[in-house]
Image (tube, rainbow, N blue to C red):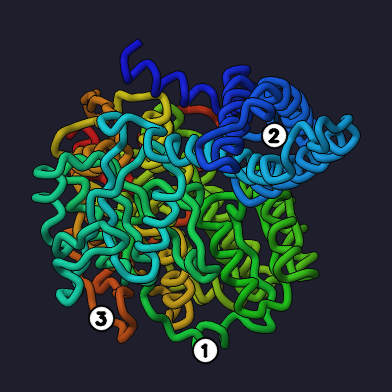
Amino acid sequence: MNRANVIDQVRQAGRLTNPMLVALDGAIVVAMTVAAYYARFDGVVPPFFGRWMPHVAAASVAVYLVLFGLFGLYQIVLRYVGLDALLRVFAATAIGSALLLGVNLLMPMEDLMRPVPLGVLFIQSVLVFVGAAGVRVAVRVFLHLHAVRPGDRQRVLIVGAGSAGPLLLREIQAHPDLAMVVIGFLDDDTAMHGRTINGVPVLGGTAELGRVVEEAGVQEVIVAMPSAPQETVRRILNAAADARVATRVMPQLLTARGSVSLRDLRPIEVEDLLGRELTPIDVEQVRATIAGTTVLVTGAAGSIGAELARQVAALGARGLVLLDVDESRLYELALELERVTPGVARVAVCDIRDAAALDAVFATHRPDVVLHAAAYKHVPLMELAPAEAVKTNVGGTRAVIAAAARHGAGRFVLISTDKAVAPVNMMGLTKSLAELVMLDAARDGSLTAMAVRFGNVLGSRGSVVPVFEEQLRRGGPLTVTHAEVTRYFMTIPEAARLVLQAQAIGRSGDVFVLEMGEPVKIVDLARKMIALSGIPAEIEFTGLRPGEKLHEALVGEHEELLPTGREKVLRVDRVRVPGPGLAEEIDALVTAAHAGDAGAVAAAIERLDPGYAERSRG
């Protein structure tokens, strides 16, 4: 049997029920009995005592093995042998020694001598304890050192040699069964470079991540910098993605308890790659428009609506009306808010296209502020169901605005989209028309109304990110429509914060744009998600879907962006002015949509946006 097979056998013998260990204990007792005799008589055992030696060895084997079994020493997992096991060995050998001594005292004497000298029994008990305990400790050490063959261990690089990194190293070193070996640290503190932590070197700064991964054959990077700025973590993660190495992150506040488990590490989320530091807002200014008021959020079961509801509740709203047709998600959100702000949230299951039902909700709750997030947002699906897009995004918005005006709401905020700018699809067109409906209401003074535009939000139900995550869970491929397609992204919490900031500074008729940063190539995002997940998925290009653009814009050709004095909130100058007769044209469009008259819908759209048909053809 070769050495590798022996190691495998010892690994598999992880429990002390193995008959080989019983035999080993028996051999130890016999050997220690012989050693005790020779130790007692300085290497020369008298014949009288020597003839009793086999009998003493046999009796000792029987006594000690039975006691070892009774003390559970053959049910302990070798890999976790500790003080408890050693105390059991001590107790068993002490009792065994006492039993053998008692038997020896009861034996008849010959020539005034007992068969077994007392010194032999004492030395034997000490040696049996040392042998039995020693073999268990030795097996644990062996398993610790050979839990996984060196070549089978995953080579790990820890980024961050502060308080968190060494805790993580200690966890990995204490569990060789994890099959991981830390080959080094990276840290930007130059005073740490060249030093070692528990025998593991600090190899350099974080800028050297790509080089170290390549030269050291790193298979996983763990970012152990829970208190680092998001920008720093994002830079490191992008470097890891470029190096195409699987990566995990230590969450914030994890080290406060003084220990770290690998179970606590989380996989990379797309927010880590694209998210930004939360933009500071004037909380008191926003609170002044929310605290003590009743706020109604339409589309409250959606990603943006739910986050708006959470933040409104935290700002001290007197009442919060959650309106949506998705009763399951609405119920879950209401339960969540009840735990945090009991007694504030109220549920209204209502379709915004139902003017009578909306009127009843507004009459019951009398909201002061309306945040209108309800809409159909899925571009390809709305190309297949244009009438539904019109009925909800245009007709529904008009119905909410009318109810708000009738029941004295002080402020109405339309959640709009970058797809409303020079729209080429039904989703964007209907949101563009919703902006016109809002502007018309603001112009005639029936309502203080405004709109806020922004691009895609990370992790929302309709975004590409959950699709990629699900495709990665299945092993790929990741489907991308076009190699050049780009999109703007923002996190859900940041978008909600900035919407609330915009409504706090807004005047009636304002259209705001949230600064989204640089557009992101979707194929680059897919590549980074694949690299950081460690899953060898492929990318498949499927072609642009109906109504999709290669690139989005946040302002139209004749619009300008002006600063507002609030970071990342910009005001659109020279917005499109609703023409006379807009209400009648919107009526015609919505009526045609309800009637299912595609020709009348197209004709109404042509009158409302004469360039749409040409743009949509591409």
Could you say which is closer to the camera, residue 136 or residue 603?
Answer: 136
| Marked residue nearer the N-terminal end (3 or 2) | 2
Could you say which is closer to the camera, residue 353 or residue 49?
Answer: 49
> In what element is the residue under mark 2?
loop
118 in relation to 450, above or below? above
Which residue type carries mark 1? Glu
Residue at image position (39%, 59%) is 491
Quarter of the image with the C terminus is: top left
- What is the crowding at mark 2: few (fewer than 14 residues within 10 Å), some, or many (at least 20)? many
Please give the residue where the numbered disc 1 appears in the rendered image. Answer: 284
Asked if disc 3 and disc 2 are in contact, CB closer than 8 Å, the reply is no
Please indicate, yes or no, whether residue 80 appears anywhere in the rendered image: no
Please give the residue where the numbered disc 3 appears in the rendered image. Answer: 563
Please give the residue where the numbered disc 2 appears in the rendered image. Answer: 73
Residue 448 picture location, percent across and down:
51, 76
- Tell me, for residue 593, which label it has, or none: none
Asked if disc 2 and disc 1 are in contact, CB closer than 8 Å, the reply is no
